[in-house]
C-alpha cells in the first residue's frame, strides 16, 4: 500500500525549519573551561604524556569523566592526541617548547585533525595538501569538499585559542612525499585565522554540547617549522603513517576507560532510583524488589567491576615492551570492543528508570549517547575488530593466551576462532589476501563477536588475577557472558539451555546481597547529579521547570510528588 506524501509539499514540513540544536558560545565554552580546570588540576607533565606514565593512565581512570564526558573528551584529545603527537618530536625540536608550554598551561586547546569527509577509515588516502614553497614554508589547502577535515572541534566558540596537529599530504616540487603532520594555529578567542573556515555541526541531541566541525583550509601559510618530522618520503609509508598516528592506538585504550566509569555510575543511579521508587496501594514496596529491576543493575555493576580490573591489566600489557606494536594495538582493540559492547547496558538501565531515564539531566541516557561516539572515535569498533580478528586468524601474531584453556570463556573464544579458521584458509589461499567474496560473506560478520569473546576471556582472567574481586562477581560475569550466546555452549555439550539459565539465575541470587558493597566500591556518589535518585532533588527539579498557568495558583500545590509506574 502506498501512502499519500503530498502533505510534505506544505512548508511546515521543510526540514530546514526543524531545530538542529545549534551550538552557542555560552553552552560550548563551559565545557572547555571545565576541561582546562581538569587538566590544570591533574598537572600532567610533558614526560607523563610522552612516556605514558602511570599518572597519564590514572588520569583516564578518573570517574570525573562521567560527570562531564564532553569536557573529558576535550581534555583527552588535547593531552593524548595533540600534546602527545607533538611531544614525540620535541627532543630534537627545542623550538616546539613554546607551543607545548602554551598547550600544557591550556592557554590554547589542542586538536588532532586526521580524517576527512571523504576519508575516514582510509585516512592514508587523505587529500589535504601542504605544498612546500621555495623558502621552505608551506601552503595548506583543502582541494575538494571531500578533503575537508571532519569532525574535530575547531570553532571560536571554545572561547580560547586552538592549536592543531593537521595531517596533510606533503608536496615538494610536484612530488607527493606522503602524509605528514603539521602544527597549525586555527584561531584565537576572537576568531579564525586567515584562510581557515570552520562550519560547526549541530549538537548531538542528548549530549553535553561540543562544537564538532567541518574544517577547510585555503592558502594557509605555514612556517617551515610547522612540519613535524622529515620532508623526505618514507621508505615504508604504511609503517611511517602508523607511527605518526600512534597516539590514536593509545586513545583506543585510554578513551575507552571512561566507558567503565560510565557503566558503574549509571548502575549506581539506577540502583538508587530503584530503591527510592515505590509501588503498591497499601504496602508500598521499592521496585528494586523485582528481579527485572535487579538484574540489569547487578549486571552493570558486575561488568563495571570486572572491566575496571581488565582496564588495569590492559594498560600493563599495553606498556609491556616485550610485546610488539601489533600485539599492543590488539590488546587496546580487544579492550575497547568489549567496553563498547558492555556499554549497551546503559540503554537498558535508562529504560528501567521509566520516562525519567529518557532525559539527559538524569545522566544515564546522556552517558549512553555520548559514549556511543567512542564506537567510531580512535578507530571504528567494527573495522578494528575485523583487522584484529583477521590478523589472529592468519596467525600473524598472538595475543596473551588463556591462563586456563579449559575455562568456559576460554573454550568459547577458541571455539569461535576454530569455526572460521577453515573459511579463512579457503578465502586466503596461497596469496594470504583476505579480499574475496567468501571472506566477505562468511568471516567478516563474525569478526566482532570473535574479538568480544577474546575480551570477555581476558576480562574474566584479569579480574580473577586481581585477587580482591568476590567470587560471586566473577561467576555472574561469566554466566552473563555465556547467556549472550547460549547456543554455542549447548551445541558443544556444556549444558542444556535450561541448565545454563538456572546457573545464571543462581549467580544473580548469590550476587544480590553484594549490591550495597558493589555500589560502595564504585565510588560514584560525587559524580551523580541526577535528580531522580532523591525525592527532594526531584521536587526541587520540578519546581525549577518553566511554568505555564492561567492564574497565580500553584497547580501542583498539595499534590503527592510520588507518582506511580
Image (cartoon, grey):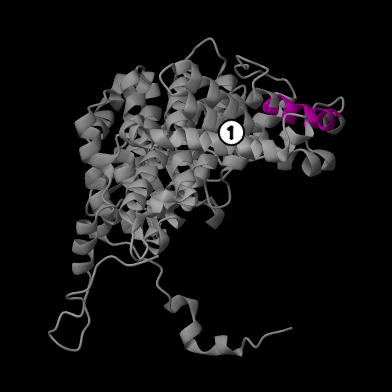
Relative to 461, 57 lies left or right: left
In the image, residue 432 above or below residue 66: above
Q: Residue furthest left?
A: 552
Viewer-nearest residue: 271 or 153 = 271
Coordinates of residue 6 in the picture (x, y in percent):
61, 89
Q: Could you tell me which residue is drawn at 71 percent across and 30 percent down?
A: 390
Name the element at disc 1. helix
User: 541 and 513: which one is in front?
Assistant: 513
On the image, numbered disc 1 is attached to which residue? 479
Residue 560 in picture, x, y percent from top left? 23, 69
Q: Which of the pair 472/520 is nearer the observer?
A: 472
User: Residue 199 placed where, x, y %?
Assistant: 40, 59
The C terminus appears in which quarter of the rendering? bottom left
The residue range painted magenta reads 412-425
Residue 558 against residue 180 in the figure, above or below: below
Number of marks in the rendered image? 1
Q: Which residue is located at x 31 percent, y 33 percent?
A: 520
Q: Is residue 217 something that shows in the picture?
A: no
Residue 264: x and y in percent read 39, 39
The relative height of residue 542 versus residue 118 in the rendered view (above or below) is below
Q: Is residue 120 visible?
A: yes
Dominant SS in magenta: helix
Q: Which quadrant is home to the N terminus?
A: bottom right
Residue 423: within the magenta? yes
Residue at 25% in and 31% down: 104
The image quadrant of residue 362 is bottom left
* Residue 471 on the magenta segment: no
- Image side of residue 26 versus residue 507, left or right: left
| 112 w.r.t. 323: above or below | below
Q: Residues within 10 Å of mark 1 (few under 14, many from 20)?
A: many
Question: Is 404 or 256 nearer to us in this picture?
Answer: 404
Amino acid at each position: 500500500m502506498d501512502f499519500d506524501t503530498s502533505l510534505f509539499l506544505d512548508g511546515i514540513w521543510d526540514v530546514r525549519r526543524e531545530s538542529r540544536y545549534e551550538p552557542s558560545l555560552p553552552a560550548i565554552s563551559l565545557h572547555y573551561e571545565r576541561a582546562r580546570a581538569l587538566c590544570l588540576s591533574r598537572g600532567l607533565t610533558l614526560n607523563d604524556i610522552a612516556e605514558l606514565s602511570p599518572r597519564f593512565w590514572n588520569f583516564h581512570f578518573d570517574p570525573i569523566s562521567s560527570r562531564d564526558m564532553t569536557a573529558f573528551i576535550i581534555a583527552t584529545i588535547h593531552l593524548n592526541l595533540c600534546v602527545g603527537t607533538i611531544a614525540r618530536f620535541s627532543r630534537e625540536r627545542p623550538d616546539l617548547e613554546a607551543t607545548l608550554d602554551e598547550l600544557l598551561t591550556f592557554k590554547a586547546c589542542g586538536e588532532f585533525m586526521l580524517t576527512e569527509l571523504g576519508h575516514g577509515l582510509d585516512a592514508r588516502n587523505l587529500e589535504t595538501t601542504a605544498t612546500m614553497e621555495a623558502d621552505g614554508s608551506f601552503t595548506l589547502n583543502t582541494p575538494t569538499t571531500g578533503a575537508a577535515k571532519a569532525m574535530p572541534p575547531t570553532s571560536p566558540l571554545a572561547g580560547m585559542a586552538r592549536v592543531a596537529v593537521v595531517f596533510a599530504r606533503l608536496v615538494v616540487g610536484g612530488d607527493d612525499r606522503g602524509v605528514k603532520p603539521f602544527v597549525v594555529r586555527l584561531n584565537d578567542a576572537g576568531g579564525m585565522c586567515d584562510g581557515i573556515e570552520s562550519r560547526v555541526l549541530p549538537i548531538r541531541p542528548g549530549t553535553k554540547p561540543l562544537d564538532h566541525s567541518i574544517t577547510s583550509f585555503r592558502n594557509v601559510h605555514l612556517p617551515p617549522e610547522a612540519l613535524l618530522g622529515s620532508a623526505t618520503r618514507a621508505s615504508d609509508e604504511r609503517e611511517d603513517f602508523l607511527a605518526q598516528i600512534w597516539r590514536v592506538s593509545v586513545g583506543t585504550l585510554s578513551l575507552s576507560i571512561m566507558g567503565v566509569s560510565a557503566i558503574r555510575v549509571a548502575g549506581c543511579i539506577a540502583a538508587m532510583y530503584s530503591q527510592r521508587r515505590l509501588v503498591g496501594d497499601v504496602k508500598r514496596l521499592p521496585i528494586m524488589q523485582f528481579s527485572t529491576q535487579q538484574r540489569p543493575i547487578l549486571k552493570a555493576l558486575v561488568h563495571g567491576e570486572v572491566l575496571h580490573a581488565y582496564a588495569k591489566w590492559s594498560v600493563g600489557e599495553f606498556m609491556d615492551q616485550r610485546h610488539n606494536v601489533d600485539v599492543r594495538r590488539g590488546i587496546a582493540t580487544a579492550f575497547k570492543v568489549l567496553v563498547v559492547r558492555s556499554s549497551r547496558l546503559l540503554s537498558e538501565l535508562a529504560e528501567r528508570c521509566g520516562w525519567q531515564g529518557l532525559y539527559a539531566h538524569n545522566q544515564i541516557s546522556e552517558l549512553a549517547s555520548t559514549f556511543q561516539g567512542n564506537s567510531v572515535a580512535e578507530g571504528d569498533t567494527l573495522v578494528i575488530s575485523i583487522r584484529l580478528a583477521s590478523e589472529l586468524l592468519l596467525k600473524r601474531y598472538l595475543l596473551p593466551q588463556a591462563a586456563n584453556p579449559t575455562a568456559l570463556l576460554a573454550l568459547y573464544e577458541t571455539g569461535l576462532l576454530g569455526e572460521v579458521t577453515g573459511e579463512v584458509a579457503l578465502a586466503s589461499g596461497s596469496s594470504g589476501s583476505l579480499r574475496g567474496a567468501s571472506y566477505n560473506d562468511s568471516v567478516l560478520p563474525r569478526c566482532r563477536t570473535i574479538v568480544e569473546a577474546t575480551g570477555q576471556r581476558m576480562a574474566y582472567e584479569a579480574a580473577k588475577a586481581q585477587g580482591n574481586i568476590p567470587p560471586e562477581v566473577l561467576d555472574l560475569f561469566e554466566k552473563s557472558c555465556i547467556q549472550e550466546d547460549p547456543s554455542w555452549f549447548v551445541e558443544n555439550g556444556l549444558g542444556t539451555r535450561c541448565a545454563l539459565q538456572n546457573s545464571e539465575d543462581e549467580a544473580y541470587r548469590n550476587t544480590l546481597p553484594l549490591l550495597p558493597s558493589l555500589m560502595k566500591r564504585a565510588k560514584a556518589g560525587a559524580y551523580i547529579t541526577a535528580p531522580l535518585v532523591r525525592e527532594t532533588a526531584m521536587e526541587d527539579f520540578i519546581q525549577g521547570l518553566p511554568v505555564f498557568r492561567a492564574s497565580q495558583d500553584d497547580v501542583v500545590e498539595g499534590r503527592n510528588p510520588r507518582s506511580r509506574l
